[in-house]
Amino acid sequence: MTLSAPAKINLYLGVHTECDDRGYHKVDSLMAAVGLVDTVTVTPAQELSVQTIPASDFPMQKNTAYRAALAMAERYGREANVCVTIEKHIPLCAGLGGPSTDAAAVIVALAELWGVDRGDPALDDIARGIGADVPFFLHASPAFYVGGGDVLATEYPALPATPVVLVKPREASVSTIEAYRRFDENPVPADKPGAIASALRAGDAETAYALIQNNLGVISAQMEPQIQSVLDWLRAQDGTVAVDVCGSGACSFAICDTVATASNLAASAQQNGWWACATELISDTVRIEVPKK
């Protein structure tokens, strides 16, 4: 079974100073999927194994996909005897949700193999136990999450296939834990998400894009000056509609007016020595690929 596991961007990320019972910050997160995808293949095997292409430099037991398979096996009393192969295209330490979407793909694959209803609430619980962004990839895009950014509140109508460029300084990385610590030291207030949520509910993409914001991204740009350089560069370019940080970084994104703008900006960013990708907003999250006849 082969699955398409897309990246995400945050159209809105509002981190609050209050924490929940688990000690996690309260987070309002409005996410949308983009067409940059990892390809996850799940095949029967004698025992559970996970491999990435290119190969990762840490033990497979620490991979989110491996942890998701174990959690599924424990919840449903099954043996997760599968080999998971992940072709990585989504950069790590980018805020694009790469490890989260890979974990969600394994949850979806095992649910399909074991005849588990994709609407089973237990799948969300399993996803939440792996990471805050994992539940998003089990549902439609765009969607609004509350709690620790991991509880589905609202799904919205699909957005147009709007061009997006993703840009990340190659060596830059931001520790999410450190970003939250810095936030606690000097909190950046978040505007309420009501306006952007209303625009999305009404299917008004243009207004929604004008309201994009991320108060944790402000902290990440302070921690990693290269992120600020990318943001400044994107905002200075013709044809960018909205610019912000993906999650806690180190990738940033720009909503673009045309496909040509996104492609040209990606090429220019690469000439600047940055990783870049021209893509678009999509309505699907993790999905099983149907073999072509």
Image: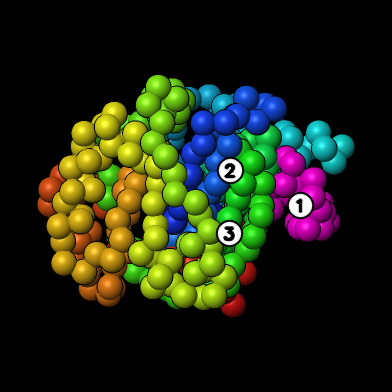
Tell which of 102 and 16 is nearer to you: 16
For residue 149, the mark is 2
Neighbor class of circle 1 (other Cα within 10 Å; few <14, some 14-19, many 20+) is: some
- Secondary element under disc 1, as helix, strand or loop, is helix
230 relative position to 114: left or right? left
26 in magenta: no
> Which numbered dot is residue 143?
3
Identity, as a three-letter code, of the amino acid under mark 2: Gly
Q: Are marks 3 and 2 in contact (CB under 8 Å)?
A: no
Within 10 Å of disc 2 (Cα), the crowding (few <14, some 14-19, many 20+) is many
Q: How many marks?
A: 3
Of the two numbered discs 3 and 2 on the same chain, state the one appearing first in sequence. 3
Q: Nearer the viewer, residue 80 or 250?
A: 250
Q: Earlier in the sequence, mark 1 or mark 3?
A: 1
Q: Which mark is residue 292?
A: none
Reading the image, the residue beneath label 1 is 111
Helix, strand, or loop for circle 2? loop
Span shown in magenta: 102-126
**Visible residue check, residue 105:** no
Colour theme? rainbow
Of residue 289 and residue 136, the one placed in the foreground of this image is 136
Residue 125 falls within the magenta-colored stretch: yes
Above or below for 56 versus 269: above
Q: Is residue 273 left or right of residue 278?
A: left
The residue located at (53%, 49%) in the rendering is 29
Q: Secondary structure at mark 3?
A: strand
Q: CA distance from mark 1 to mark 2?
A: 23 Å
Dot placed on the residue nearer the N-terminal end, 1 or 2: 1
Q: Position of residue 166 (x, y in %)?
A: 31, 54
